[in-house]
Amino acid sequence: MGELLAYTLKSGIVLLALYLAYRLWLSGEKQHAMNRCILMGIYAVSFGLFPLLSLCHSGHPDAFTHPITIIEVKADVNTTTPSIWPIYLIWVYVAGMAVVTFNTLFVAAKIMWLIQRSEKRPYGRFTLVVTNRPDITPFSWLHYMVMSRKDFEEDGSVIANHELQHLRSWHWVDLVIAQVVIILEWWNPAAWLMRREVMANHEYQADMGVLDSGMDLISYQQLLIRKAVGARFPSLTDSLNHSSLKNRFTMMYSKHPGRGRRLRALVLVPALLLALAVVSTPQVNAALSAIRSTPALADKVTENTASDQDKVVNAVFVKNEGSVIVTLTVDCPTQSMNVADAKLFIGDKEYSAKIMSSTMADGDAMIMCTFPTDEPIDNARMTVKVNNQTITVNANQSDRVGNNTKTITLVNGASSTTPPVGVKVYLNDKEITWDDMNAIDQDEIENVVVDKGSTPTVIHIFTKK
């Protein structure tokens, strides 16, 4: 759930920036079909941009088919309990989502109850619903157009014409999308304001459709004034009296913009770039990373109450071409191992393990995870669940092979030059010790290759001729 909250926070920043640009430069233009596409495009960009970027970033071939040019970083292993504030924030977020979801379902149930208890008549490929409730303002929903019996008898044909504009244009699909966004981003004012823009644009389109069909402008405006008061379902339906009558009347008298004014849509590009710049700031990245890596409450309780927790003995980060390989050696007192949910965090980017393997020997488990990325790993952070315990490993300093200061920090604060369990090192095809590897002059190294297919795993170091 922390990942979902972090994702909606990022997308919410983009949604807010694009909404403001739309509201200031585009919402007053008489280009309703284009504005509808723009509004739906804002939703698509806000929620689809970051998964698309992650997908493009992860399209690398298998890591072990490329030579290594820089391997090894000194790692600081951290298994402390995460900050408590992200956990509270996540629960508030979940509670808000639950409330908005319940309200949405409640409104949908009220609409269905009204339809089921009213008279239904075929109206072409749609259904006309006539209710005996005089307080109901005409509205459309799914394939239904609903109006009171009084409205049907007095202005039935004009009202039906208006509601048909909504139904033929599938406006209800836009409202479903807008409501889903509100459920996910109930905390974001832009989500609620975007839905209002969507519904207002629907009414502009329907009004134009009625007038283009031959309806007298003054008579139609008088009808809208008469129907300005009445009960409606604003979260899920297009109602005849939705939106400001002043704005709708103004739009009716407006002229269609020229091609030059349509170029105003390009203002969304700098707004998007500004939002991405905000999301990329270190402060925002740090907050999102803390939220994203927060374990579920049940996992936190398990970590704090377990009597025989698994402990990290050492950790090695390996930077390969097209991948990052992280090897953990874990002391498992329970003599059992369940490894899952390995993720790598670099800045605001998140990567799931493409390849993950683990072995157990004498109570020590070696876990090797490969992540598809070419990003620098100076400030990388990895999380993995071992026997339902979330382990976090932070890489904080890059070194080339052969740097004599290269060490692996233990969880108890000591240091070790012992290689990870099950790893052998060869220099120009001759086996050497870990100490020998530390003594190699890094300037003499040409490349390094990891042979994952062998057992145990072998690191081949080749020096310059």
Image (cartoon, rainbow, N blue to C red):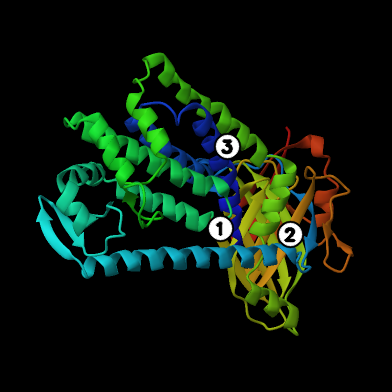
Relative placement, left or right, of 304 versus 356 is right
Please state which of residues 182 and 161 is positioned toward the viewer in this rendering.
161
**In whole angstroms, how far apart are the C-alphas of marks 2 and 1?**
22 Å
The residue shown at (41%, 26%) is: 29
Query: Is residue 68 depicted above or below 385 in this figure?
Result: above
Q: Do callouts 1 and 3 mark residues in contact (Cβ within 8 Å)?
A: no
At label 2, the amino acid type is Val
* Residue linked to disc 2: 393
At label 3, the amino acid type is Ala
**Which picture quadrant has residue 66?**
top right
Q: Residue 363 at what x, y percent from top left?
A: 70, 79
Q: Do callouts 2 and 3 mark residues in contact (Cβ within 8 Å)?
A: no
The residue shown at (75%, 78%) is: 304
At label 1, the amino acid type is Leu
Please state which of residues 237 and 389 is positioned toward the viewer in this rendering.
237
Query: Is residue 182 depicted above or below 159 in this figure?
Result: below
Categorize mark 1 by other alpha carbons within 10 Å: few (<14), some (14-19), many (20+): some
Q: Residue 336 at what x, y percent from top left?
A: 63, 81
Relative placement, left or right, of 232 versus 215 is right
Q: Residue 176 at what x, y percent from top left?
A: 37, 53
SS type, badge 3: helix
* Residue linked to disc 1: 4
**In whole angstroms, how far apart are the C-alphas of marks 1 and 3?**
20 Å
**In whole angstroms, how far apart are the C-alphas of marks 2 and 3?**
34 Å
Query: Is residue 280 depicted above or below 94 in this figure?
Result: above
* Residue linked to disc 3: 17
Categorize mark 2 by other alpha carbons within 10 Å: few (<14), some (14-19), many (20+): many
Categorize mark 3 by other alpha carbons within 10 Å: few (<14), some (14-19), many (20+): many
